[in-house]
Amino acid sequence: MVVVCLIACAAPEDPADKPIARAYDKVLHWSDLRKVIPMDASQEDSAMLAQRYMESWMQQEVFLRVAESNLSADRLDLEEQLENYRRSLVIFNYEQALVDQKLDVDVTEEAISAYYEAHRSNFELKDNIVRARWFKVNEPDKRVVRKMEERFMGGNSEQRHELELWLARSGVTITDRSDSWTPFTQLLAEVPLSEAEAGSLLIKNGSKVLKEGNTAWFVEILEHRSRNSVSPLDLVRQDIRSILLNQRKLQLIESMRRNVYKQALDKNEVEIYD
């Protein structure tokens, strides 16, 4: 509690800087704790933080002693490793600044399409995907469900519109993925299609109504792409843009390296002695 009180009460620094923990020949002092424990911390928090810090410090010193005792002299000599890391980090930061300043991030649709056509085999689908719409209705009146099914399966645009208005008034949400690709597994997670029914829908686009008790599921597949086929461009457009930008980045860095090295050679700032 003495440790806690001194920290929590923000007592003046002890001229002797009393030691509070030891690990081998190294000592932890009051001043070390004051640096890591907030002055406005409660007494309880101060006690917890102080105990945690002291144990962590002692553990680290033990691990360090074991490591130093078991590593070879070559592995203990970190100066060269640190210098190599510093050099790499300085160069990396400069290259990143150069990229931020000079990289052209405008990627045209023509460039994206050209890359897609040249590398179609790289964009193989891992799962079945669909453009689809589906919704679920809880309706005990079979006649109402039958009329909905007629409008959904064979109705014209006006009848479809009437159905959508009825759904909106009834608070039924339509999951509309007609303008974007979605994994077929997402649809299966919401609509209890059997394996045969799912396979049939993927072979031939179309509509289907499933009924179970008072619940009916309405599914419309507008388009599908099978697993292992080539992914639609819309689905990989951003990936291709990232690929093209990364290629430009690497080319920009390589060009910079060649130019600055050539300049140094031309100015006789670097040379290989005979």
Image (tube, rainbow, N blue to C red):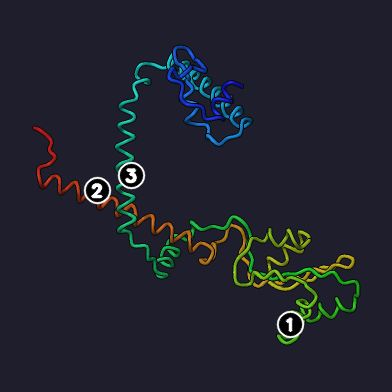
The disc, 3 or 2, on the residue closer to the chain's N-terminal end is 3
68 vs 177: above or below: above
Q: Residue at x 37, y 20 (%)?
A: 76
**What's the amino acid at mark 3?**
Phe
The disc, 3 or 1, on the residue closer to the chain's N-terminal end is 3
Label 2 close to label 1 by CB (< 8 Å)? no
**What's the amino acid at mark 1?**
Arg
Image x and y of residue 80, in percent: 30, 27
- Front residue (pair 153, 26): 26
- Front residue (pair 203, 148): 148
Image x and y of residue 62, in percent: 50, 17
Residue underneath mark 3:
92
- Front residue (pair 207, 186): 186
Residue underneath mark 2:
257
The disc placed on residue 160 is 1
Image x and y of residue 110, in percent: 40, 70
- Are there few (<14), some (14-19), or many (20+) residues within 10 Å of tag 3? few
The disc placed on residue 61 is none
